[in-house]
Image (cartoon, rainbow, N blue to C red):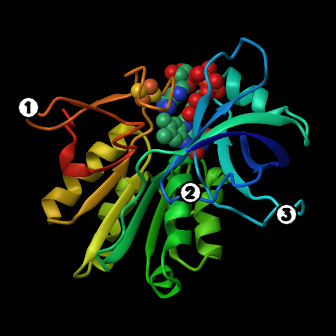
Amino acid sequence: MRVCRAKIDLLQEVQPGAFLLGLAARGISHEARPGQFYMLKIGEEADPFLPRPFSWLRRGPQASCGGDRVEILFQVVGKGTARLARMPLGEELQVLGPLGRGWEFDTGGFPLLLGGGIGAASLISLLEGLPPKLRLDSWALVGARSGNQLWCGEEMSRMGARVMLASQDGLKGFHGTVLELLKHEQDSLLRAGTEVFACGPWEMLRQVALWASSKGLPCQISVETPMACGVGVCLGCAVRLSGSRGYVRACQEGPVFRAEEIEWD
Ligand SMILES: Cc1cc2nc3c(=O)[nH]c(=O)nc-3n(C[C@H](O)[C@H](O)[C@H](O)COP(=O)(O)OP(=O)(O)OC[C@H]3O[C@@H](n4cnc5c(N)ncnc54)[C@H](O)[C@@H]3O)c2cc1C
Ligand code: FES
């Protein structure tokens, strides 16, 4: 983990209200692993006071200054992200990261990636980290409210994965949620060794966890619990573990967990 000042070298709206952000700084992504995240302090003013967490999307093309860079995909939802979307190229942000425990992939299984909304961003780093042959052998199901919000799915397709899209307005792909698509296609998707990786809204993750358990499939999920510090101090990101094992901090022990570790009810 490191703190640095990074220069905005890319800010592009890739789908309505969602921006691809490039940040350049020496060493910023040297230690980054798929599924980790960064905390960004947006602007120098007191408001917004707290930094905001965003998943590491990928490194992207290296900065011409000979430094290093990260790309992040963010959706405008409130004052911090609205402010970020208006920042000029060349502006500097304070960045903390990479943080947290990312995806684990060492079993040699067949990845089945399930992404809901902007949560699919975290799966792009996973896909990029897979050996090329396995990437081509992966399935990715990506859903969004509207067919014009499926940039992540289209990007995964460009990266070589086999992709199915779902939109709730029916504009693109399957008409419905990613879970409905999953249940519709499960017979053709499942094979021995399938391993599930999911990121999206809590209710989607809960349903995915139930589904994977009913099929006996190993499943990892990444939670996007709101975070204030990102480094394990404030306890604001507590996630309840199953049984009587208490709570863990999503920013330290997560954000990726094995689905059976979590108390979903
Ligand atoms: C580990 C992690 C990774 C994340 N990765 C991404 C990413 O790659 N791209 C992305 O766009 N977003 C991501 N998020 C969510 C992102 O951090 C929030 O959308 C952001 O902090 C909102 O800031 P804001 O100031 O614009 O909104 P605020 O003004 O703080 O809030 C606006 C509204 O959004 C809600 N909100 C804020 N944070 C969250 C959250 N974490 N989950 C659900 N609702 C929330 C608030 O309750 C409020 O209703 C991630 C969150 C975590 C914890
Ligand atoms: S965000 Fe502060 S402990 Fe996790």
Residue at the (49%, 79%) spot, across then down: 135
Amino acid at dot 3: Gly
Please name the residue that numbered disc 2 is placed on.
Answer: 32
**Alpha carbon of mark 2 to alpha carbon of mark 3: how far?**
18 Å
Please name the residue that numbered disc 1 is placed on.
Answer: 244
Amino acid at dot 2: Ala
Residue at the (29%, 52%) spot, across then down: 208
Work out which residue is located at the far bottom of the displayed protein and give it: 133
- Label located before the other in sequence (2 or 3): 2
- Label located before the other in sequence (1 or 3): 3
Residue 145 appearing in the image:
no
**Alpha carbon of mark 1 to alpha carbon of mark 3: how far?**
50 Å
Q: Is residue 105 left or right of residue 23?
A: left
Q: Secondary structure at mark 2?
A: loop
Please name the residue that numbered disc 3 is placed on.
Answer: 66
Residue 63, x across and y down, in percent: 83, 61
